[in-house]
Image (spheres, rainbow, N blue to C red):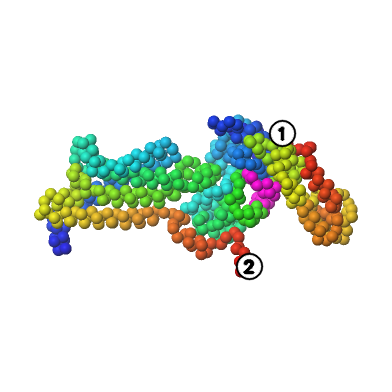
Amino acid sequence: MGELIQYITDPANTFADHTRDTIVLCLVPIVLSLLIALPLGVLVARQPVAAFLATNVSGLVRAIPTFAVLMVMLLLLKQIGFTPSAIALTALGVPPILLNMIAGLRGVDPAAIDAARGMGMTRPQVLARVELPLVLPVAAAGVRSAAVQIVATVPLAALIGGGGYGEYILNGLSNEANAIDLFVGAVSVALLALLTEAIFAIVQRAVTPAGLRAGLQAADAAIGPTDIEAPREKAA
Amino acid sequence: MATIEFVDVTKTYPGALRPAVDRVSFTVPEGAICMLLGTSGSGKTTLLRMVNRLIDPTSGAILIDGTPTTQRDPITLRRGIGYVIQQVGLFPHMTIAENVRVVPSILGRPASEMAARVDELLELVGLEPGEYRGRYPRQLSGGQQQRVGLARALAADPSVLLMDEPFGALDAITRERMQEELLRIQRGVRKTILFVSHDVGEALKLGDQIVVMSEGRLIQQGTPVELLAHPADDFVRRLIGGNDSILRQFEYLPVTTALEPGTGEADASDEALAADATLLHALLRMMQSGQSALRIERDGATIGHVSLASISRQVQAGSASTGAPVTAQ
């Protein structure tokens, strides 16, 4: 433990810089994934062909190992470092958000949309007032799983010079004498992944409208009156 | 207040063999409840959805107060027309109050101005505002949700109300109660209501007039009494009565249809029956009192009498009638 603290606090190991690099390398792909997947989901969800394509391409992309994507980016961009790493991680983050956006939007009660249109909402109003508030919790679940995946994968980026905790791990793997590097890198990434999971769980809860939260139904059973009084005399 | 006029309205969906709505013409007078009655696939919902331009007619026109709907911007048009559907379609993420004021809110009215109006509307539909305005749709029963649906449709005070089988998903007891509530509310608000139903009892009970549709065509238009007394053809006769035709007439025909002048054999000292009572009421009263004739009153004045014989003549005439159908143009 003492060794660990010593390692982290040793200026030569630049732990703070590595932490910052890791967080930036996670945040940028998460934000990019959001910027791509949210509008794309809105665009394709109501187009059967586009939604079908998006769903299946997303599934395919998820099946490709991130390691391969990193290498492809390296070859395509002919450079190492932050940019190819961020792009590869973004490719990892888009599918879960996009899939949830499509599933969420298609899951919005058609009656609510019919009512919204029938009472004179414009298409953007239907989207902003009805569809998005209802799809937000589902999209947030997608963002949560995308974020955790990105954080868990971020050490691989060190392979193409993306920096961050991955450098410790590579160091540790390259030389038995550097086992402490490996340990610090692995534990830091694991902790960051847990923290991410916790933060996005809170975000997901926060964007879930009160009317949709679990537990509401239970409250109803306790206090909710019905239109018909149960014929108690008969039952007795 | 508004009249709705359908002129040769036709809708053919792409690829369909026959029109979903085929040259339908009729007029709904101001403040009336017009029931669109028919089996599924008869085109009644298509006809309804053309009024607020959720569907546009292939040919023909729908005029509201003389103005063709196609000359109006669909969004503006819809904001002036109340819309109630079977699945209710409340917005689950909004409170009941937010649901009710949604149309005024898209019209730009701030929520603070709407508070009193929301409470008034909730009271109108029989929901205690203090108890319900802060709740969410999922906390309400089906019948309560449709009450909110009705309040939401009335919020911007539209002159026209479109209702697409609004009580179709409710249990029989709740449905009946909601029908009575609608009649009570309508007495106060006097909207021009177009109401789609496949339930004959509902149509006879609620309708000032009934439009019977089949396979996209208008088969007959008339008041419940006209339809019961003079069904245009076998389809209408089967739809309206079938084997229960006589029972339906007892249930829905007012005593005035069997009215004869004077007091006849009715005992003038006996309690009179009100003119809006049905033949069934009259029969029950006769059985209870052992009389064979009853005096009929309107506003406290005797307007005539009914007897077993006059009721029997009326009902037999209705069941056997083939002539003088009241068809639309």
Q: Position of residue B267 (x, y in %)?
A: 88, 58
The answer to whether any part of residue B147 appears in the image is: no
Q: Nearer the viewer, mark 1 or mark 2?
A: 2
Q: Amino acid at mark 2?
A: Glu
Q: Position of residue B296 (x, y in %)?
A: 83, 54
- Magenta span contains residue B48: no
Q: Nearer the viewer, residue B249 or B328?
A: B249
Label 2: state its secondary structure.
helix
Q: Pick out the residue farthest to the front.
A: B243
**What's the residue at 25%, 57% (across, down)?**
A191
Chain bearing mark 1 = B
Packing grade of label 1 (10 A; few <14, some 14-19, many >=20) is: few
**What's the residue at 63%, 42% (across, down)?**
B39
Q: Nearer the viewer, residue A136 or B232?
A: B232
Chain bearing mark 2 = A
Please give left or right for residue B239 compared with residue B76 in the image: right
Residue B177 numbered tag: none
Q: Pick out the residue farthest to the bottom.
A: A236
The answer to whether any part of residue B254 appears in the image is: yes
Q: Look at the image and tell me in which quarter the C terminus of chain B lies.
A: top right
Residue that label 2 marks:
A233
The magenta-colored residue range is B181-205
Q: Position of residue A167 (x, y in %)?
A: 17, 49
Whether the residues at callouts 1 and 2 have beta carbons within 8 Å, the answer is no
Residue B329 numbered tag: 1
**What's the residue at 83%, 61% (across, down)?**
B289
Q: Amino acid at mark 1?
A: Gln
Q: Pick out the residue farthest to the left.
A: A177
Please name the predominant secondary structure of the magenta segment in the image: helix
Residue B59 lies, with reference to residue B180, above or below; the image says: above
The CA distance from mark 1 to mark 2 is 55 Å
Q: Position of residue B262 (x, y in %)?
A: 88, 51
